[in-house]
Amino acid sequence: MRLAILPLAALLALSAACSQTAAPPPPQKQKTVWDDQLKAIDKAKGVQQTVDQNKKEADKRLEQSENAGTDASKKND
């Protein structure tokens, strides 16, 4: 009798695990009063990243041109 209970219990556990439904989708974000301001902040952050990247590139080019000028003046000496 004990041997018959074990397979039945395993079958019950497996069927219970498979019968669960998928998780419901997350609720959609509701529009708030602050959405326009938050969107503007995100846009400003993106612009700032672009400005910072352009500054780094300009600084790098300037440093390279200064080093090239320094190297040229050493050759002339």
Image (cartoon, rainbow, N blue to C red):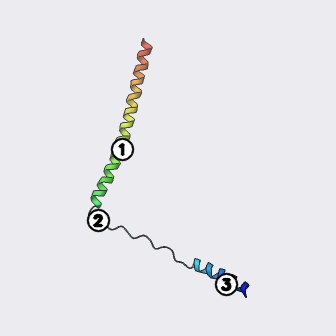
The quadrant of the rendering that contains the C terminus is top left
- Residue occupied by mark 1: 50
Label 2: few (<14), some or many (≥20) within 10 Å? few
| Quarter location, residue 57 | top left
Residue indicated by mark 3: 8
Question: Which SS class for mark 2?
Answer: loop
Quarter occupied by residue 59: top left
Residue matched to label 2: 32
The disc labelled 1 sits on which kind of residue? Answer: Thr
Q: What residue is rendered at 33% in x and 47% in y? A: 47
Q: Nearer the viewer, mark 1 or mark 2?
A: 2
Q: How many marks?
A: 3
Residue at mark 1 to residue at mark 2: CA–CA distance: 28 Å
Q: Is 28 located above or below residue 15 in the figure?
A: above
Amino acid on which the number 2 mark rests in the picture: Thr
| Mark positioned earlier in the residue sequence (1 or 3) | 3
Give the camera-side residue of 57 and 12.
12
**Does 68 sit above or below residue 40?**
above
Q: Is residue 76 left or right of residue 1?
A: left
Instruction: State the CA–CA distance, disc 1 to disc 3.
Output: 64 Å
Asked if residue 8 lies left or right of residue 17, the reply is right
Q: Quadrant of residue 16?
A: bottom right
